Image (cartoon, rainbow, N blue to C red):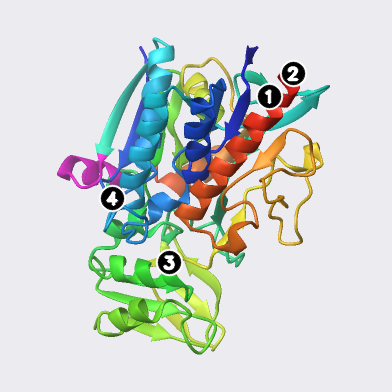
Amino acid sequence: MPATIEVFTSPTCPHCPSAVKLAKELAKERDDIRVIESSTVTAQGQKRAQKYGIMTVPTVLVSGPSHPQKIGLQGTPPKSSLIKAVEASLGLRVLEEEKREGFFSKLLKKFNIKVKV
Amino acid sequence: MEKYDTIIIGSGPAGLTAAIYTVRYNLKTLVIGQDFGLITEAHKVENYPGFESASGFEIMEKINAHAIKLGAEIVNDTVLKVEKEKKEFIVKTGSKKYQAPTIIIASGTKKRKLNIPGEEEFLGKGVSYCATCDGPFFKDKIVGIVGGNDSAVIAAELIAQYAKKVYIIYRKEELRAKPALVSEIKKNKKIEIINNTNVTKVKGDDVLKKAILDTGNDLELDGLFIEIGTVPVTALTDPLGIKLTSAKFIETAENQSTNVNGVFAAGDITTNSNNLRQMITAASEGSIAATSVFNYVRGIKK
């Protein structure tokens, strides 16, 4: 099962095309990623943005079969950070931040993301 | 490791114009950048020749397409480090390394922070540095904008299209934006100017709820946009020993060279063009840097 990179965008956001482009380029380089663009001017996109408490674009959410929570990145992340998030979601690495206690509670608070069991 | 004649760090107006010139000089050119730079946050540019009114993003798309058509290789990535090995520069991103005898640093500037309590905590939860990005999230809400320059006033005008109320909070008596812009926003009933005031703290719970002012008042807000200018992005310069001004801009000669052989700089990160940081001066410096790179490389090859 692939990792999912969901990029929240809006049509007036000048940094959003770079974030989408980065996600799509990474998906082309690997065969274990699918990319979704959620535009926050659509009803569906707004609903998803509200679900995760997103109030800024671009926001990139990464999820995968081996990581119980979505990993959230604000702004267009450096490619290396996006790769780390993808690999963590696929169980190929542990994020540095996760080695520190309290990471999950901080992530939950910041992104209103519930742990999936 | 891939080798080039020049590696341009930054894909904004300076970097991409430099690429247009270096490619036409038949120099093998690589541009590494994450996006088109801060100009893309300008939703209306009316002083770039040939464009009566266009967004910064639209203009940059055309410049980007031009550079690609000529043969510039442009990589969407972040340069993490540049090292010098003998007469070559090794440019490292998170996953790759590239080599060239010359580099052009065109990494631009980033938004200046207020550095107040709560600013980091509520980033993306009410605090923003990009009106064109996040303005739409504040439909029918109350928003504050910190700053008094053109960007702050333009941001106010943009956000007022969505918000119920916009406060411009400025530390001095008079806004220093262009008079034409100021008179436009003064006509807008949704916009109120709070002058001689600083924001000292922001508070909230899951999201931003209020700004604490140094007048002793609290301002209930759903959003706070910070538009207090920019600072240069010079994270790469120290290891190379590049000379900076006291304000951390790169010191460049008229030909855009720096104190390090083979390193050139262009755009907002320099103090050339009489410190006029506009798209047109960035493009101009990019072309000058490119010409200097051409002369430098030609000197090596002799």
Measured Cα–Cα span from mark 4 to mark 3:
16 Å
Element at badge 1?
helix
Residue type, mark 2 in image:
Lys
B22 sits left or right of B256 in the view: left
Measured Cα–Cα span from mark 4 to mark 2:
50 Å
Residue type, mark 3 in image:
Ser
Badge 3 vs badge 2, beta-carbon distance below 8 Å: no
B15 sits left or right of A13 in the view: right
Q: What residue sits 67% from the left and 31% below the top?
A: B295
Residue for badge 4:
A12
Query: Magenta stretch?
Result: A39-49
Badge 1 vs badge 2, beta-carbon distance below 8 Å: yes
Q: What residue sits 58% from the left and 19% below the top?
A: A93
**Which dot, 3 or 2, sits closer to the camera?**
2
Tag on residue B302?
A: 2
Residue for badge 3:
B151
Same chain for mark 1 and mark 4? The answer is no
Element at badge 3?
helix
Instruction: Find the residue positioned furthest to the front.
Output: B302
Residue type, mark 1 in image:
Arg
Picture quadrant where residue B151 is located? bottom left
Dominant SS in magenta: helix
Label 4 chain ID:
A
B290 sits left or right of B148 in the view: right
Image location of residue B177, percent across then percent down: 44, 76
